[in-house]
Image: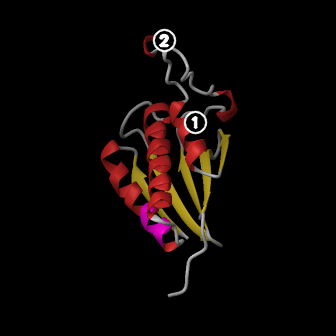
Amino acid sequence: MTVKTFASRFENLARIRELVGEAARRAGFNDAEVYDVMLAVDEACSNIIEHAYGGEGHGDIECACEILDHSLRVTLHDWGESFDLERVPDPECDVPLEQLRLRGAGLALMRRLMDDIRFDSSSDNGNTLTMLKHADHAPHDP
């Protein structure tokens, strides 16, 4: 398992994407799957910076990547404000553009890109977002 801690700054998103992208490739994911993982983690980290910390530089994001049997588990931990994952509404995408409210769009995207998402929060231990992605195919032997 690889674990690294990053300051909650948007400039660190590229380093976090690189970390999870490398782990996804080691897990045997194809290019599209690697991209899905990187995009989901980027969105999650952006949400941590914007919503949990209320802006850049107010805390750290711990990112852990664990390669499982043809799967990758990414765990993001922060010590910011918590929220109830189940209370975030799905975005309304079937309304006229001027009425579109995108609150929850990032979470909907993460749910679509990843196979499982779990969120735990406590006042003592902070917030933990765990996302799991399965490879669509088993790696081949050359």
Which residue is labeled 2 in the image? 99
- How many angstroms separate mark 1 from mark 2 (CA)? 18 Å
Q: Image quadrant of residue 137?
A: bottom right
Q: Which residue is mark 1?
A: 108
Q: Identify the residue at image location x=51%, y=67%.
A: 29
Residue shown at 62%/56% (left/top)? 132
44 sits to left or right of 7: right
View extreme (left): residue: 11
Q: Which residues are magenta?
A: 21-25
**Which SS does the magenta portion mostly show?**
helix
Residue 135 included in the magenta stretch of the image: no
**In the rendered structure, are the residues bearing label 1 and label 2 in contact, judged by CB atoms less than 8 Å apart?**
no
Query: Which residue is located at x 66 percent, y 32 percent?
Result: 84
Q: Can you give x and y, in whole percent of width and height, for residue 22 in the image?
A: 43, 67
Q: Is residue 45 above or below residue 142?
A: above
Please identify the quarter of the rendering in which residue 141 is found.
bottom right
74, above or below 129, in the image: below
